[in-house]
Amino acid sequence: MAKCYALCNDQIDCRAFRYLPKNRFCFVYDSIQNTEDNISESLFYVKRCVLCYMFSTKNAKGCDDEMESVWEEISSLEKCEDNCIKSDDCRAVHYDGNICFKFTDEVRLYTKIDIDFSRKICDQYTD
């Protein structure tokens, strides 16, 4: 099964695959519409893509009580956002010019001059 995952992930035009465990065979599909063959004793998987980006707001911050952790030695909002994108549990960050503050839950915004807030937005799609 792992080889089927890898095969589909390595092919840009792969949208889904069907795995037959009995003979360890994969069918790779370039369109989800062409997958209606009903092969018994098979497993069907649709490749999903997740696109995440950061949406920033100037002069805003999250509540200190909702802060999860701190990333020190961050030199810019962009690096703070990069850390958030790379962290699965990060939902938002605010950057005060020296320190990046990480939030893992929904955050209420408050006005605060000279602090930048950025929320992670992720969209999942198949095609």
Image (cartoon, grey):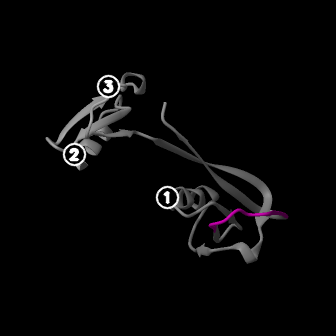
- Amino acid on which the number 2 mark rests in the picture: Lys
Q: Decide if residue 49 is on the left or right side of residue 107.
A: left
The residue singled out by tag 2 in the image is 3
- Amino acid on which the number 1 mark rests in the picture: Lys
For mark 2, give the secondary structure. helix
Q: Nearer the viewer, residue 38 or 70?
A: 38
Residue at 80% of width from left, 60% of height from top? 60
Residue at 27% of width from left, 31% of height from top? 39
The CA span between labels 2 and 1 is 25 Å
The residue singled out by tag 3 in the image is 37
- Relative to 7, say whether 99 is above or below: below
For mark 1, give the secondary structure. helix
Q: Decide if residue 115 is on the left or right side of residue 85.
A: right
- Amino acid on which the number 3 mark rests in the picture: Asp
Q: Nearer the viewer, residue 63 or 59?
A: 63
The residue singled out by tag 1 in the image is 86
